[in-house]
Image (cartoon, rainbow, N blue to C red):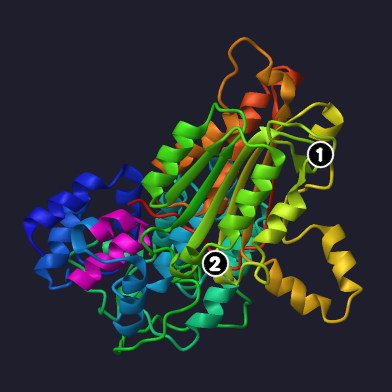
Amino acid sequence: MSAEVIHQVEEALDEDEKDALLFLCRDVAANAVPLNVRDLLDILRERGKLSSVNLAELLYRVRRFDLLKSILNMDTPTVEALLRRHPHLISDYRVLMMEIGEDLDKSEVSSLMFLMRDYTGRSKIAKDKSFLDLAVELEKLNLVAPDQLNLLEECLTNINRIDLKTKIQKYRQSAQGVETNYVNARQASLPNLSVKDPSYNLRLQNGWSKEQRPMMGPPDIQREPVKRPIQESGAFLPQHAVEERYKMQSKPLGICLIIDCIGNDTDILRDTFTFLGYEVRHFLYLTMTDITNILRQVAQMPQHRDSDSFACILVSRGGSQSVFGVDQTHSGVPLDHIRRMFMADMCPSLSGKPKLFFIQSYVKSEGQLEDSSFLEVDGPSVKSAESKARQPGAYQDLIHREADFFWSLCKADVSLLEGPSSSPSLYLRCLSQKLWKERKHSLLELHTELNSLVYDWNSKVSAKERYYVWLQHTLRKNLFLPHK
């Protein structure tokens, strides 16, 4: 790997990504203490551990899929296939710790640091440090290791992150019988000390003798020594290491239909989804009949067969469960009818592919803003599930027809449109900003961040100016939107 490529990678990574790489490579950079990513990559190159496959793995682990494409000309499925066929540079333990760190917010990391005080003694960790910094300190104290995660599990339970405890348990199951090249933080910080030295564990345990070291597991179970690696081509890739994702590689990525009956948001939405790689088709100021006809026509388009996804943005005045178009009627176009047009039995060319809906509806009454039938749930609405469950074979039909939907609905008071110059939707503006800027977060993660921005706005304005966002989805895999 050339020095030019190393320079390009270092220049493109942000500080968090650089810290993550330094952590991930602690084991493979044993007997050296790289001060920065450039040093790290140079060390790996000198040791013959920076092939294109190795660099692809590193960029994949920090979710820099754009660099995979621009520097190595690889897409995500290609890298995932390589990881299944080739030995891994990064240990599954390091990947696990990085993923845990990504899932924790600052307050949770602070709580973990506080809970660890009973075990770290006088060791002080600055409050502004990350979870990976905490992990390094715990490794130095021999409190955390690939086969010693009981303390971390206990503390995660105490902060109510059972999901992360479950993640560790899945790692344990996948790691049974798999050998690792783990080198703890204290070993990595001592370049002149051979990690193969059998007297190491007796001579250096941060001031503790073997008998004085804290026991993290049951007292009658002695921890097995960490084994050295024996890696083979075609090694099994644990489930947590490569998350199952929707294929998002087609060009174009799919059709993006924009129906804007207000006229404030078309330009930014068109630019955003064109940037993501969609073929955008936009329509302004449609009647209710036109909305229905265009949706039906788009649902039957043959282009879906060659696309990996579909996106639809609706902006209109509406009711509790409908959109009106420009010729407001009493009932409007029911949202359930819109979704039904794109279910697998009605639109088989999109079966198994993600179908993304973002709807901005301006409604008249506060009661409609707070309609409880659109709670944030993973799957179809309860009413829909109950009605279908009474029919023969309804469960299988429900799973098949309604799978792979991402349905984001935002309601706002119609008075926002009644001023002399109405503004674009805050919801759609924040959505566009997130889709433009973020590279390494899934769509669900982006939507969570969007919610946070909307909540911040709502805390500062009057009730008439607030936005209310609901999310329903039946996604079966992680969904990352690529950039062209």
- Measured as percent of width and height from the top left, residue 262 is found at 61, 28
Magenta stretch, overall SS? helix
- Measured as percent of width and height from the top left, residue 300 is found at 58, 63
Looking at the rendered structure, which numbered label has been put on residue 353?
A: 2
Q: Is residue 93 left or right of residue 374?
A: left
Please identify the quarter of the rendering in which residue 307 is found.
Answer: bottom left
The correct choice, above or below, for 202 with respect to 291 in the image is below
Cα distance in 3D space between marks 1 and 2 = 28 Å
Q: Is 54 contained in the magenta span?
A: yes
Q: Is 455 contained in the magenta span?
A: no
Closer to us: 297 or 382: 297
Residue shown at the point (80%, 36%) measured from the top left? 319
Q: Which residue is mark 1?
A: 320
The correct choice, above or below, for 220 with respect to 454 in the image is below
Closer to us: 163 or 84: 84
| Residues in magenta, as a range | 52-69
- Identified by mark 2, the residue type is Lys
- Identified by mark 1, the residue type is Ser
Q: Is residue 53 left or right of residue 362?
A: left
Residue shown at the point (36%, 57%) measured from the top left? 62
Closer to us: 478 or 22: 478
Task: Check contact, mark 1 vs mark 2: CB within 8 A.
Answer: no
